[in-house]
Image (cartoon, rainbow, N blue to C red):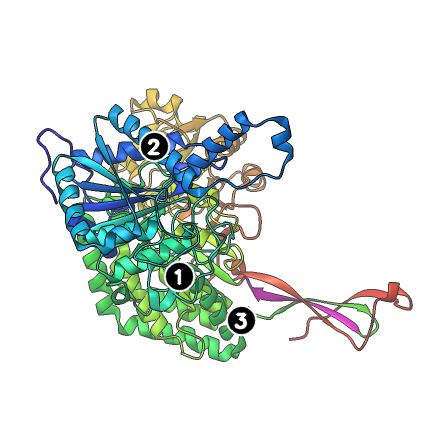
Amino acid sequence: MPTRPRGTKRLPELKAANGNVDSTRAFVRHVKRLVIKVGTAVVTRADGRLALGRLGALCEQIKELNLQGYEVIMVSSGAVGLGRQRLRYRKLVNSSFADLQKPQVELDGKACAAVGQSSLMALYDTLFSQLDVTSAQLLVTDHDFKSIDFRMQLNETVQSLLSLTVVPIFNENDAVSTRKAPYEDSSGIFWDNDSLAALLALELKADLLILLSDVEGLYSGPPSDPKSRLIRTYIKERHQGEITFGDKSRVGRGGMTAKVNAAVNAAQAGIPVVITSGYAPENILKVLQGEDIGTLFHEDAHLWVQSQDISAREMAVAARESSRNLQAISSEDRRKVLLDIADALEANQEQIMKENEADVAAAEKAGYERSLIARLALKPGKITNLANSIRVLAKMEDPIGRVLKRTELADGLVLEKTSSPLGVLLIVFESRPEALVQIASLAVRSGNGLLLKGGKEAKRSNAILHKVITDAIPDSIGGRLIGLVTSREEIPDLLKLDDVIDLVIPRGSNKLVSQIKESTKIPVLGHSDGICHVYVDKSANMEMANRIIVDAKVDYPAACNAMETLLLHKDLVPAGGLNAIVFGLRTKGVTLYGGPKVSSMLNIPQALSLHHEYNSMACTIETVDDVHQAIDHIHQYGSAHTDCIIAEDGEAVETFLRQVDSAAVFHNASTRFCDGARFGLGAEVGISTSRIHARGPVGVEGLLTTRWILRGNGQVVDGDKGVTYTHRDLPIQS
């Protein structure tokens, strides 16, 4: 990295958005000299006027780079467009009414370039002067580069300017260019400002070329098409025949086609190139910080390709195709796939635990919270338990193609309602690597394709579990039935694929679930909070109550079904019930916070919020007047996950069970029972608190939808003439 002037601040340390530097962007550590090309669409607005805000933000970034000691060279378009606008105005002012009635002749492009160039440079000079930066204008033509002496002089001049911390600004001198058709001709040493920027990057030995555009980067199709995807790294062997370019630039000469041609040529010559948006105010700085933005062109890109390195859309489409192969095989063969996965997990148990231990050690070293580390660790015997859960799933009745209802519509016309896989699921989960096993086995049992994105803290655990599971799936089904998404940057692309992905299930924090719900049109199933309540009625058996309360809080405090709030009937306070419960919790190491009533009563800290999920050895305690007030409290502060009443009064119990509007409501049982395996579902993809589709622990049935199959013998509607509808229920045949 270049030497920085004394007293200047550093750029943020090289760090990508997900906290890790992508290996494909590591080269930016060594960038000293860069060429930045600014497109006409960045310089001007849609109406042709100057985009002062964008230009100001651009100049501020270059000022920051100057302070850091980077050598910045600019290539700026926009002169012709700016000159055309000024000359049109001047022509209008000088025209008579009669002149305006005549056919209008297009303005001479060279005249536009001459007028616009001085205006453009005046603007750059003004903006940079406000930032205490000096800029210099260098106009060149294609013919100039044919001279070796010119090239030598160019290098000397630029080197001299850069040594004085002056920003050289290049543009093609269209006003005097000998090019016959300067806005269409693509012959010569360079033919537009994109190819000029690539030429200068090579000629001036730059370390990086940044081409600023009006879109985020190179897309697989027109950026306006929702099916188009952003290509993060351009690999010629893969992408050359795949991309469909949209319209030409609205104001410049070539648009994205010209940028890609220039980028490919520069990259092949050893100059890395990033095409990114010039609309975002800090994109140049982000590129130099190693963030995975825009599209990268690099001479080593072909070496980064791995067998699993496919786009988000390709991954989703492959999962759908593989799921159809899975549905096509026999029920017995699908059962065998699950049994093979269970056996493979146990056979590779030692390697799985080794990778998980490495994840846990890294998490401890990084200073992660104890609750996260608890979720991350695979306890002894966990792999065997997971394998046995998969075997339970395998023994269940095949859920695919079950006839749920048969109806005779008319004589000889029979309608069947059947169970069917949803299609492709995207599961985003945090911390718990066992979730990958549970979700994958449920997807196989329900015949769905699956895309998985786990937390970076479980990277090694997820990778080995995914490999073991997919290796156990026959090639006839397809190795991409279950895809593992390894980059956080791929999630936004996946969330756009509402035509390929059928359901998103986030398992993690409230923030994660909320972000996903706000970022996609795909249906989202899950819960954002697990604020579970236990209400102890005055009729409760207190020995039982203490046992349930301790289990609900202490057994696995990081789980979403752990108790977070304890509600006690007010009559238990004078009877000593409150003190006994407090003693039992404190003995187990639980930190207690009080509601408004209990905090003063027990002299404990008041909870900052009664709607709070601790996910740790802590909980809130509050008293209520009766079961009705307990229900009101749960509805106001709960999350509709799991709530429990401990009572012997039958009327209070039935009132609670009927009126508490949560996904799971228990009587005299720990909230920890709210679990797919404990419910006999074999496993769960998560717990849903939504009221549409599935609710509570979601197992196989929650991953199914229905299809209608009609069997006839030549009937037609024909206005319903001659059709006698019977709508008679028929027995479901086994």
- Is 439 located above or below residue 96 in the figure? below
- Is 250 located above or below residue 436 in the figure? above
Disc 1 designates what residue?
A: 311
Nearer mark to the viewer, of 1 and 3: 1
**Which residue lies most toward the top here?**
600
Give the image location of residue 163, x and y in percent: 11, 38
Disc 2 designates what residue?
A: 118
Nearer mark to the viewer, of 2 and 3: 2
For label 3, the SS is loop
Horizontal side of residue 296 vs 251, given as left or right: left
Q: Residues within 10 Å of mark 3 (few under 14, many from 20)?
A: few
Query: Magenta stretch?
Result: 413-422
Three-letter amino acid code at the position of disc 3:
Glu
Q: Residues within 10 Å of mark 2 (few under 14, many from 20)?
A: some
Q: Residue at x 27, y 35 (%)?
A: 61
Give the image location of residue 174, x and y in percent: 36, 44
Horizontal side of residue 661 vs 220, given as left or right: right
> Mark 2 vs mark 3: which is more N-terminal?
2
Occupied quadrant, residue 486: bottom left
Horizontal side of residue 626 vs 709, given as left or right: left
Residue 397's disc is 3
Is the C terminus in the top left, top right, bottom left or bottom right quadrant? Answer: bottom right
Residue 253's disc is none
For label 1, the SS is loop
Residue 579 at least partly seen: no
Main SS class of the magenta portion in the image: strand
Looking at the picture, tell me which residue is in the foreground, 672 or 538. 672
Occupied quadrant, residue 470: bottom left
Is the N terminus in the top left, top right, bottom left or bottom right quadrant? Answer: top left
